[in-house]
Amino acid sequence: MPKPPKRKSRAPQLHDTAASECNLPDFSAPKYKLLHLGDTALAVELGDGIDRAVSAQVLALGRRLKQKCLDGVTESVPTLRSLMVCYDPLVLPAAALVAHIDELMQGGLEGSEASGRCWSLPVCYDSAFAPDLEHAAARTGLSAAQVIERHSALTYHVYMLGFLPGQAYMGDLPPELVLPRRESPACGYPRGHSQSRPR
């Protein structure tokens, strides 16, 4: 009796072909992987850590995909190290989308970051709104004023939005302000506060 055909797995699959994982070291054709997220989305992974160069590639791919105006692509969502591409499989089959993405990747992504909007956010460092300020100063060996000076002197890069609508994941802190998580997390942060967290 003939064996029945094997059913295809519906679990997330790593698209592991020469087209999806390029062994080219230069920025013009970055190494990447495709991960299928069900049957209506896939993720284009461009790195395995938080890195400005990887973020630039993610954003550049998002722009190029938008410029291509593919019928069936419903949304693209940048993350820390990947671009999630949502699509309608009845309009754009997965294999066709993979081919389009591979074409974009092989064509190269621009090596410089595109100019974006710069937002100025008011921050209050009063003890009522910055309960961790003295703790951070003690851990770094800096004064509270020096922590404020270093924390507020930078222009931060927004890597992604998520968790809550509009919540920005920003980087990068000066090395002297990068601290491990507290052994006992503080509670009762006021509404609208910002936090600095370890990677």
Image (cartoon, rainbow, N blue to C red):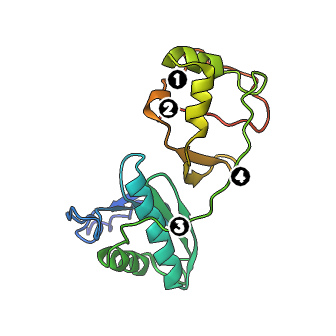
Position of 59 with respect to 118 (left or right) is left
The answer to whether the residue labelled 4 contacts the one labelled 2, judged by CB atoms less than 8 Å apart, is: no
Q: Kindly state the secondary structure of the residue where label 2 is placed.
A: loop
Which comes sooner in the sequence, label 3 or label 1? 3
Q: Which residue is mark 1?
A: 181
Mark closer to the chain start, 2 or 3: 3
Front: mark 4 or 3: 3
Q: Is residue 105 above or below residue 188?
A: below
Which three-letter amino acid code belongs to the residue tagged 2?
Answer: Pro
On the rendered structure, is 65 left or right of 187? Answer: left
- Amino acid tagged 3: Ser
Observer-nearest residue: 25 or 112? 112
Q: Are marks 2 and 1 in contact (CB under 8 Å)?
A: yes
Q: Quadrant of the N terminus?
A: bottom left
| SS type, badge 1 | loop
Residue under circle 4?
165
Q: Which mark is residue 198?
A: 2
- Of badges 2 and 3, the one in the foreground is 3
Quote the CA–CA distance across marks 4 and 3: 23 Å
**CA neighbours of label 4 inside 10 A, class few (<14), some (14 to 19), many (20+):** few
Q: CA distance from mark 4 to mark 1?
A: 24 Å
Residue 86 position in % (x across, y down): 55, 69
Query: For the residue carrying disc 2, how many other residues have a C-alpha within 10 Å: few (<14), some (14-19), or many (20+)?
Result: few
Q: x, y percentage for residue 14?
A: 34, 59
Gap in angstroms between the C-alphas marked 4 and 2:
21 Å
Is 167 positioned to the left or the right of 153 in the image? right
Residue 115 - label: 3
Is residue 121 at least partly visible in the picture?
yes
On screen, residue 95 above or below 86:
below
Q: Is residue 52 above or below residue 116?
A: above
- In this orientation, which residue lies closer to the viewer: 37 or 136? 136
